Each structure stands twice: as structure tokens, then as C-alpha cells.
Image (cartoon, rainbow, N blue to C red):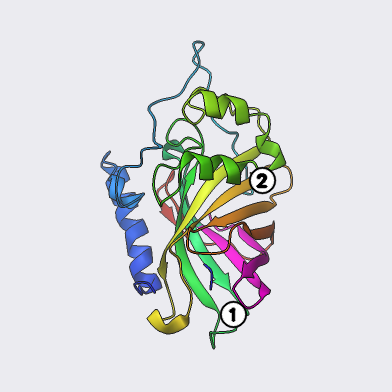
Amino acid sequence: MVFNQKKESWNSCRSRLLQFVSHRKMGVRRSSEVSDSAPSSSVSGKEDNSGCSLLPPECSLLSVGQAFGGTQNVSSMQKEEAWRVNVRIQGVDRDHGYLCGTMEALNVPSADTPVVTFWEGEIIDTKNYTFYTGKWEASHEDDTRHWSKFASFSEFSTQVESSDGGRSLDMSSCPYIFMRWKEQYFVNVGKDCGLTIAGFYYVCFSCQDGSINGYYFDPNSSPFQMLELKPTHEGRSGVGFSSYQLQ
């Protein structure tokens, strides 16, 4: 979020997660639970010729209930600010490259209370999603410019540009997981909160220490507003899609 969108209660957000789980149980995946339309960045199944997975590694710090804390640098025409931010993972479905959670901004000058949003994310696994976004007004050039902000992306940059977003990349040994996070709804504030969630975050997650770095993209906002998060040890809660258990 940066310096008005539809309001939805957390109960309604949670019901969307439960509905997603219900459809997974029946073996039906509704693409609308991931995004409003089928993303052009999605691709088909991914294994090498030996049958080994080329997907990013599993990481316990990117799991249901994990909390993160840090800051987001926010720029406006008047000044630059750093908001304190908390993030919690509410659901993960690695098979389909999906995750979701909540983001809480704590010291927003225009808001009387912390501002909470519900977001959905795409894991760049080159099975379900590539490095090319294909929506949200992001061009391939925008994608390359933002991913290149992460030093860990440098080893993939040439292949991404030469293979339509990195469809054939082997991500299995990469110590980082790349994602896109798109805020969907304000949970606890109305249209007059003075913020926008029209854009999305390019995100890089470290499997080694659980740190997260991100850059916000919105053609109508200041470029490269940075998100920096570290894992915390708060109590876990959320929805585990793989086991269909609610916590």
C-alpha cells in the first residue's frame, strides 16, 4: 500500500480461503481464487527429463502463520516516510504457486488506526508463474527493471530475457524465492483512508534467514518504494491448503 478501494471484513477474506480449500478437496482449482483472470505469466507442469523437480526449495520460514516485521519506505510529492509494517502468512499452496496473507501498516499519518490489507501472492516457480507479470500494468521492461534490483536475480537475468520470463529455469538450488504480492482489499478502513493498493510488490525471500525485500510497483506512484522485513516469533495462525487444516 502507498500514499480507494473496496472494503472487506477479515471474516469475508477468511471465507475466501475456506472456499479455496473446499474446492481443492474436490480436486477443482478455481483460477479466480488466485487472481481475477488467468495470468499470462502462468505456465504448465515443470520437471526435468529425469523427473526431478526444478521448483524452488521448501522453506519452513515461508509457511502458514509465520509473521514478519519491518518497514516500508513511502514517497510522496511532499516527503519520504518509513512506515512500520507487519506481515503474516495466512495460506500457502506450493503446488499451485499461491500464498496469501495480511499486511499491517502501523504509523500511517493519514489513518487513526493501523491499516490492514489482505494480499494474495504468486510464487515464481516457473511452473505456475514466471518472472514476467503480464498484468497489473507491468511491462516486461518494468519486470526486468524491478527484479534487477535484487542482487540474487543476476544469475537468472539473461535466461529470463531470452526464454520468455524464465520458463526453463532450474530454481531447485536457489537460496531465494521470488514472488509477487498483490493487495486485494482493505480489511479495517474505508475509502477515505488516503491510501492506494492499486500496485503490487516484487518480492525476494531468503531461505537462509527468512528476510524479505520488496519493491512496490504502481505507474501512478513513486518508483522503487522498498519493503524490508525480518521473521518474528509470534504465535502462528492461518490456513494450510496442503493439509486442509485450519489453525
Observer-side mark, 2 or 1, equals 2
Magenta residues, dominant SS class: strand
How many C-alpha atoms fall within 10 Å of the one at disc 2: few (<14), some, or many (≥20)?
A: some
Q: Residues within 10 Å of mark 1 (few under 14, many from 20)?
A: many
Question: Amino acid under label 1?
Answer: Val
User: Is residue 224 shown left or right of residue 211?
Assistant: left
Considering depth in this image, is 180 or 52 the residue closer to the camera?
180
The answer to which image quadrant residue 66 occupies is: bottom right
Q: Which mark is residue 149?
A: 2
Q: Range of the magenta residues? A: 64-89
Q: Label 1 near label 2: C-beta < 8 Å?
A: no
Residue 78 sits inside the magenta stretch: yes
**What residue do we see at 59% from left, 49% from top?**
203
Residue farthest toward the front in the current orientation of the protein: 77
Where on the picture, by quarter, is residue 83? bottom right
User: Height in image: 136 above or below 47?
Assistant: below
Up-down relation of residue 221 to residue 109 (above or below): above
Badge 2 or badge 1: first in the primary sequence? 1
Q: Position of residue 58 (x, y in %)?
A: 59, 37
Please give the name of the residue rendered at 57% of the width and 24% of the height, measured from the top-left corner.
Answer: 159
The three-letter code of the residue at mark 2 reads Lys
Judge by depth and name the residue closer to the eye, 220 or 238.
220
What SS does tag 1 mark?
loop
Quick check: can you spot residue 63? no
SS at mark 2? loop
The numbered dot on residue 76 is: none
Task: Find residue 172 and report its horizontal and vertical position in percent.
Answer: 60, 27
Circle 1 sits on which residue? 108
With 138 as the anchor, is 160 left or right in this view? right
In the picture as drawn, the residue positioned furthest to the bottom comes out as 112
